[in-house]
Amino acid sequence: MTHCALCQRPVDSRVLAYVDELRPPVRRLVETTVAGWQAEAGICPSCALVYAQQAADQRHTTPLNVTTDPHTTFPYYHPAEESVLAQWERLPDYESWTGQGVTIAFLDSGFFPHPDLTTAQTWTGERPDWAHLPPAQLRKQVEVAAPRLIDYVDLTGGQEALGLDHPALWDDSWLSWHGQMTTTVAAGNGL
């Protein structure tokens, strides 16, 4: 057991090694705020969270890309972060908003009933290699986990195919992935 170089709390040295996961603006903030701190010394999760929040608090509410000449092609909100931020950094997570009772309709292509769209919160046993399962085996695995899908409509080929039992939902058209990506980002369970 070692200690955090900033707060002196005891912490497992393996946790301190995660200092490499700090975003560069957060790391620079610690380096400029704490005299003599070197990244090699590490940082505990509590201190990392404090500095990550301080860096987030320095973000502007309006984009800075229009303040440069020439303008950048994407909006950025912190002078030390002239890059596109990940979704989890741009959007706060509100635990009181669970999504319970919400129904979302997706109009897209390349969709299939992925395990992320089931009621299961964890996968029991060995996790299947989803990308390599034949359609029939994928369907069996997903149906066991109770899909949260309400309905399916396929409008390709000038036809209207309806229902969760329609073969188009379970064939290999899921290899066209865009609809699947947008659906699991919005409503996936992390499986």
Image (cartoon, rainbow, N blue to C red):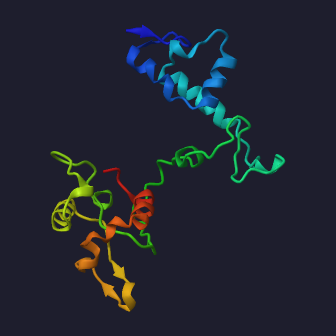
Residue at left 51%, top 9%?
8
Single out the residue that lies furthest toward the bottom: 158
> How many numbered dots are placed on residues in this image?
0
Residue 93 vs residue 169, the one in the foreground: 169
The N terminus: image quadrant: top left
Depicted 135 relative to depicted 86: above or below = below
Q: Quadrant of residue 16?
A: top left
Left or right side of 146 for 157:
right
Depicted 162 relative to depicted 116: above or below = below
Residue at left 51%, top 18%?
43
Depicted 120 relative to depicted 125: above or below = below
Left or right side of 22 for 168:
left
Left or right side of 150 for 23:
right
Residue 159 coordinates in the image, percent (x, y): 35, 91
Residue 3 coordinates in the image, percent (x, y): 46, 9
Residue 11 vs residue 167, the one in the foreground: 167
Residue at left 27%, top 69%?
172
Residue 69 coordinates in the image, percent (x, y): 84, 47
Residue 129 coordinates in the image, percent (x, y): 23, 51
Left or right side of 30 for 110:
left
Residue 71 vs residue 153, the one in the foreground: 71
Residue at left 71%, top 35%?
58
